[in-house]
Image (spheres, rainbow, N blue to C red):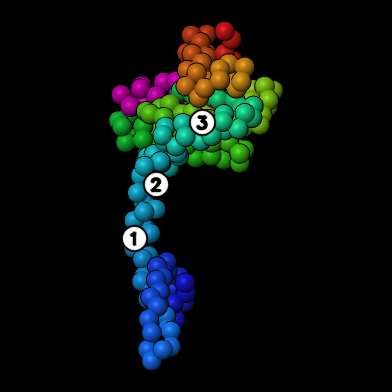
């Protein structure tokens, strides 16, 4: 509703019928529940979003990935891990590391297609899934992400440089459950690291 002062509010409306001299009336009550709705929104955000990066968290990602798989549509999952992030924390401190995570998260948001879902899983690990996609488009996106992340970030007058390793798995080729697809993308990411980092690897059984 919009109040007389033009402020938008959420209102809970309830009505109660009653009779007076044989005539039926309804008494209507409007209760301003804006504060309650804002609290619910905040609780939802805390439950499904990562506080540091602003990206969805592991719980939200798994929920949305399961929904997409239930629809039976082809999709790809990318498991991304930053190379050298521990060295950043050890050398410059966790404040710089946190700021770097925020910069990387912003880059991912800007790069990904609108239909993609990205999440920060933990530490320097990110997961992305792209519904209704194909192998070549996924590989091209992985290349774009790798190129973007290896560009330095200036934090507190320091030039911070990290790279990324990405593992890719596809549904339904590489598994028929969210757990299986994420596991195989994770395995592919470790293979990318083993081969020298700063690259992607596609899962192959």
Rendered view: 95 above or below 12: above
Instruction: Using the image, tell me which numbered label, if any, was put on residue 45.
Output: 2
Q: Magenta residues: mostly which secondary structure?
A: helix
| Label 1 sits on residue | 36
| Mark toward the viewer: 3 or 2 | 3
Q: Identify the residue at the far bottom of this view.
A: 21
36 horizontally vs 168: left or right = left
**Separation of residues labelled 1 and 2 (CA atoms):** 14 Å
Label 2: few (<14), some or many (≥20) within 10 Å?
Answer: some
Instruction: Using the image, tell me which numbered label, if any, was put on residue 66.
Output: 3
**Separation of residues labelled 3 and 1 (CA atoms):** 30 Å
Q: Position of residue 29 (x, y in %)?
A: 37, 76
Dot 3: element: helix
Chain part drawn in magenta: 82-91
Q: Is residue 195 magenta?
A: no
Dot 2: element: helix
């Amino acid at each position: 509703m919009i109040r007389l002062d033009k402020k938008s509010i959420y209102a809970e409306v309830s009505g109660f019928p009653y009779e007076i001299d044989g005539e039926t009336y309804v008494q209507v009550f409007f209760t301003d529940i804006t504060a309650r709705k804002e609290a619910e929104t905040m609780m939802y955000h805390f439950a499904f979003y990562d506080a540091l990066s602003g990206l969805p968290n592991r719980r939200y990602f798994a929920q949305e990935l399961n929904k997409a798989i239930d629809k039976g549509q082809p999709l790809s999952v990318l498991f991304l891990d930053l190379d050298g992030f521990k060295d950043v924390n050890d050398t410059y401190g966790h404040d710089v590391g946190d700021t770097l995570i925020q910069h990387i998260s912003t880059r991912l948001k800007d790069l990904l297609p609108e239909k993609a879902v990205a999440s920060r899983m933990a530490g320097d690990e990110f997961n992305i899934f792209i519904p209704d996609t194909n192998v070549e488009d996924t590989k091209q996106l992985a290349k774009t992400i790798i190129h973007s992340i290896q560009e330095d970030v200036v934090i507190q007058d320091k030039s911070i440089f990290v790279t990324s390793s990405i593992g890719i798995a596809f549904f339904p080729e590489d598994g028929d459950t969210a757990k299986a697809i994420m596991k195989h993308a994770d395995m592919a990411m470790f293979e990318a690291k083993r081969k020298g980092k700063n690259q992607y690897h596609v899962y192959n059984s």
